[in-house]
Image (cartoon, grey):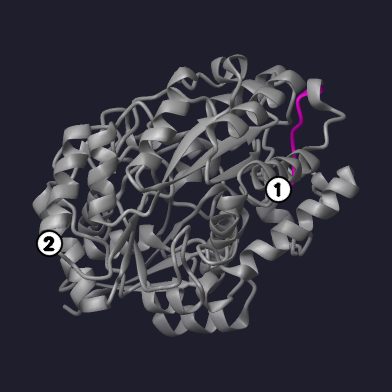
Amino acid sequence: MPPRRIALLWPRGFEPSTTVSLPLAYLKANVDPARFDVQIIDCALDGLDADSPALARRLRALQPELVGVSTWSPMFPEAIALLRLVRSIDPSVPTVLGGAHPSSYAERCMEHPEVDLLFVGEAERGFAMLLDRIFDADPDLADVPGLVWRDGDGLVRNAQDLPDDLDAIAPPDLTAIRLSEYVRRGYRWNSPPVPNAPLWVTRGCPYRCQYCAAPELNGRPVRTHSIDYMMRWIRRLYDEQGVRWFNIIDDNFTYHVAFAKDFCRALIALDLPDVGFGTPNGIRMSRGDAELWRLMKRAGWRHLIVAPESGSAHTLELMKKDLKLGVVKDTVRDIQAAGLKCQAFFIVGYPGERPEDIAATFDLIRDCRFNFVFLANFQPLPGTPVYDELVAKGEIPDGLLPFNFSDGARVYTPPELADFNFSAFILKTHLMMAVTHPANLPYHARVLFHLYRPGFVVPKLLKTVRSMLRPDAQRPATPFVPMHQQADALHRGGLRG
């Protein structure tokens, strides 16, 4: 029997210069190629909407026997529209939905008749098992990990898959998602314009930050690949794909400090010329020490990102960040003493935050002399505890969905900050950094125009200036449509940009 034809679709939404279709690379790498011919259709990379005739032609030519779509929240309406297209071509094709948004709203997503099956959380092993069984006359789905499926008139939600042995998962097939084309299109994140690749080394998050859904997506225990596995993977990408910068996308790469040190020592022993490493999601300041920072510098790190999120103890308590502000300045000093630049993440406009809390953030940034800071407007992200709390309190409508996590548009503002000009604060903070630390100006410019693609940075700068002069511009102009109705509006053309 020839291999069964499987189509995996990545919806159009985020720009290929910032986001790569990594989930599909993992799924393809972990199925049996002798039995399943997995074809990836990257709608973002190819500029294909769900209503594109070219996409419909590709699907008709492929004649897939199963179609899967992975999606984040901003791409969810487009993901449903893709599955609706699949159904219009062949109503009998089984459809599967996965990714961060379906993992947070499985039952709501399954209300859409276009979705037959859904995966919650990590799906490499579960998807492979599903393919092994779905084509049976009477498929047994009861123990497919992470699967949500219909049984009669109700839904069954199988236990989420959180494997301890991460080495049993094959590395993602980055060739199949055309990583080189992503790089040609400018893909990178806080890294120089060289061939680069994402690495996922550890999974899980034990913390309780209310603005983040990571513990629900990947569990609370922090699990790790073996160091030998990771070194083989890095060596292969270096030799076969010419990768010279590796971005470790983990939420908690340094959680196990001894592991992180051994990882760095192994990198040093590889002795790969012209290699750099980054941890763009940030590291926990309490999970590391001066020795680790020095090892990271020797292994190829050039900067570290920390995530205080606020300079106010009051705001940190609201966030449940579990961070003592007293450690911040010393940690920054130790990182810089190791020869690394220190960048930092901050959130402004968190629910319950007051003007004096934002002033405390300004003071912390001034006193710590970070080399760069990212000041993000708070976004109530679907699937996070604070999102559910705001819905329960009636402060945001059920189904509110930012159209982009990082576009700067505010869909929620705390009552205490109703008249606060967030864009003016962001520009004021960066101006203060320039005035108080002029020797850092070249690096500041390097982050903006070298470590990020200018075509990504310049529109954001212009938007920030515009919204400073016109604060109403910080609010999206598109009328609110609940996220699980947006697919219908999108299909009618009402939400196209």
The residue tagged 2 is 270
In the depicted structure, whether residue 96 falls above or below residue 85: above
- Residue 131 image point, x, y percent: 25, 59
- Disc number lying in front (2 or 1): 2
Residue 200 seen by the camera? yes
Q: Amino acid at mark 1?
A: Gly
Q: Is residue 471 left or right of residue 156?
A: right
In the depicted structure, whether residue 325 falls above or below residue 283: above
User: What residue is shown at x 80% (from left), y 20% (from top)?
Assistant: 416
- Residue 7 image point, x, y percent: 38, 70
Give the camera-side residue of 78 and 220.
220
Q: Is residue 39 left or right of residue 382?
A: left
Q: Amino acid at mark 2?
A: Leu
Q: Residues within 10 Å of mark 1 (few under 14, many from 20)?
A: many
Q: Is residue 348 magenta?
A: no
Q: Which mark is residue 408?
A: 1
**On the rendered image, what quadrant is the N terminus found in?**
bottom left
Q: Which residues are magenta?
A: 408-415
Q: Secondary structure at mark 2?
A: helix
Residue 413 figure quarter: top right
Q: Residue furthest front?
A: 439
